[in-house]
Image (cartoon, rainbow, N blue to C red):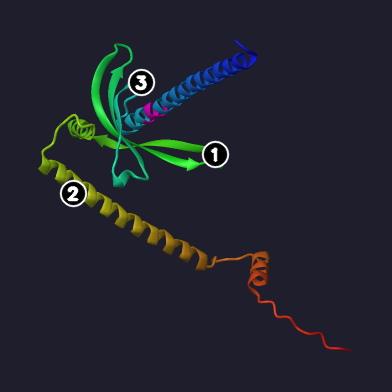
Amino acid sequence: MDTMTIVLMVVLVGVIGFVIVTTITGRKASKKEKEKRYQEVRERIKSYIAKEEGRKNLRIEFEKVYARKGAEYKYRDVFDVVIEIIEPKTNKILEIRAYEVEGLTTKIDKKNYKTDWQVNGVLELEDTKKRIAISEKKIKLTKEERDQLKRDEKLRGKELKEKEKLEYKKVKAETKENKTKEPKTLSSADRINKHLQTQKFVPTRKKAD
């Protein structure tokens, strides 16, 4: 075996090792991020239950988390979350519920984003499970039912576009109104600054003495 072959083998082993390490590190980071996200959602649901029902000291375990799909969720992160509410001392499952949870993502800087989770409300459990099963194709639908689902989705998408259009017009009108609206009272310094900012500069020629 010549030197070149040995060098190539060493390089190949190094590349394979790098790929393996990178993959393992990436998976660990992804798992850690998922656990963090789940914990945040747990706390939001616990806070929601405490606020709405006054129940505290509960343990929340996830039974199913499903990301909604369709035109109306193109720009929204909305999840159907089926949970078990557990009594910590006895480990007894007190109740199984479904919640609608939404992630609101904001940009922190050029590369980083922050997601805040909010609970939009309690869902009907059986309807939620059925909707998830249909989406995951665990329940077979007739052609008529599939066509109806498509029509419903198309209608919701159309309604969403109209809603977004109205909201855009409202924000635009409010922005325009805020720009044109004058403050009721201005200090002397503010009045001087405003006068200087709005006064048109007219060049004049100085007369010779």
Q: What secondary structure prevails in the magenta region?
A: helix
Give the secondary structure at mark 1. loop
| C-beta proximity under 8 Å, tags 2 and 1 | no
Give the secondary structure at mark 2. helix
Q: Residue at x 37, y 45 (%)?
A: 75
> Alpha-carbon neighbours of circle 2 within 10 Å: few (<14), some, or many (≥20)?
few
Residue named by callout 3: 57
Is residue 181 visible from the viewing direction of this image?
A: no
- How far is the residue under mark 2 from the one under mark 3? 44 Å
Residue 27 position in % (x across, y down): 45, 22
The residue closer to the viewer here, 4 or 53, is: 4
Residue 3 position in % (x across, y down): 64, 14
- How far is the residue under mark 2 from the one under mark 1? 39 Å
136 inside magenta stretch: no
Mark identifier at residue 160:
none
The residue closer to the viewer here, 119 or 150, is: 150
Q: Which tag, 1 or 3, sits closer to the chain's start? A: 3
Mark identifier at residue 111:
1
Tag in front: 2 or 3: 2
Against 29, is 204 above or below? Answer: below
Residue named by callout 2: 151
